[in-house]
Amino acid sequence: MSVKLTYVDTGGEGPPLFVVHGLLGSADNWRSHVKQWQERRRVVAVDLRNHGRSPHVHGMSYGEMAHDLLALMDRLGIERAHLLGHSMGGKVVVTLARMVPERVASLIVADIAPQAYGHGHDAVFAGLRQLKAGRPANRREADALLAEHVEDRATRLFLATNLKRGEAGELELRIGLDQIEAGYEDIMQTPAGQGAFDGPALVLRGGNSHYVTDDMLPALREVLPLAEIKTLEGAGHWLHAEQPDAFQASVNDFLEALEA
C-alpha cells in the first residue's frame, strides 16, 4: 500500500520536474534549487517515506518508494513528468521509469549508479542514535552528540537538517530512524524493475565522488542506454550543494534541449 507523501508544489504549466532527495535528506535540502527552477517550470519536491514530513512506515524497498511517487503523480493529476533523483532518490526514479516508462518524460540521476553498494552508514546511524537518546536542548548540544560518531562537520550539518523542536522543547529527529535502519539492506540494493529505460536521461556525477566510477558506466548504460554522462569537477557526492551553479545549469540545459 502506498504512502501519502508530503511535497512542495510550485504550480505552473507543462510537465513538472519532480525532485527526489537521497538517504536522510528531504525536500527542504532543495529549496534554493527549487526557487530557481520554478522561474522556468513547475517543480514538485517530495519527502520520501520515513523522511522529512512524510509518514513513518516499515518498508524501504525501491518498488515501494516508486509506488509512493507514482501515487503522488496520480493524486496531482500529472500524466508525465521529468524526474530528478539524488543518490537513493536516483534509484527511486530509475525504478519508476522501469515500471511505467510512459509516465516519465526524462530522467536526471545525480551521483548514483543502478547497482548495489556496500554498507557505509554505520557511524551515521550510531550518531543519530546518540542524538536521539541525548535529547539535546539546542543545536550545539546536538552537534556534540553527533560528533561522538561523525567526524566530518559538513555531514553533521546535513544530518542536523532532520531536527525539529519537540513538544517538550528539546530537539528530536523527524525521520523514521527505526524504519530506515530496518530497511537499510534494501536501500543499498539495485533499483527495482527490469530492463532499460529508453527515454532521455542525464547522469551527473561528482568528480571527487566514488559513487559513479568509470568502471560502472557499462552497467549504467545497460539501464539508461541514452544517458548523457556529465562530471562536475570539484564536487563530491553532494554535488548539488557543492557545485550548485554548475548543477543548476546542467539540469536547465538538459531540459531546455528536450523542449526546444
Image (cartoon, rainbow, N blue to C red):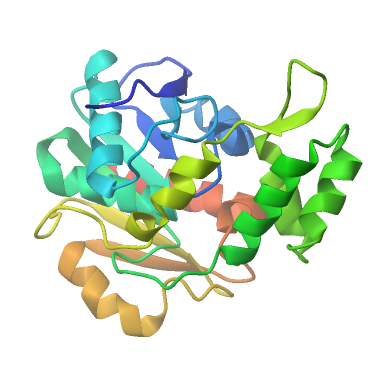
Q: Is there any visible trace of residue 22 in the rendered image?
A: no
Of residues 85 and 41, which is closer to you in this image?
85
Quick check: 8 above or below 183?
A: above
Q: Position of residue 143 (x, y in %)?
A: 83, 49
Quick check: 111 above or below 133?
A: below
Q: Position of residue 144 (x, y in %)?
A: 87, 52
The single residue placed furthest to the bottom in the displayed view is: 215
Does residue 217 appear left or right of residue 184 in this picture?
left
Does residue 198 appear left or right of residue 2 in this picture?
left
Does residue 44 appear left or right of residue 207 in this picture?
left
Of residues 194 and 123, which is closer to you in this image?
123
Q: Position of residue 79 (x, y in %)?
A: 18, 23
Does residue 234 appear left or right of residue 144 in this picture?
left
Q: Picture quarter containing residue 168?
A: top right
Q: Is there any visible trace of residue 252 in the rendered image?
A: yes
Q: Position of residue 40 (x, y in %)?
A: 46, 28
Residue at 50% x, 35% y: name it.
51
Residue at 32% x, 41% y: name it.
59
Q: Picture quarter containing residue 189?
A: bottom left
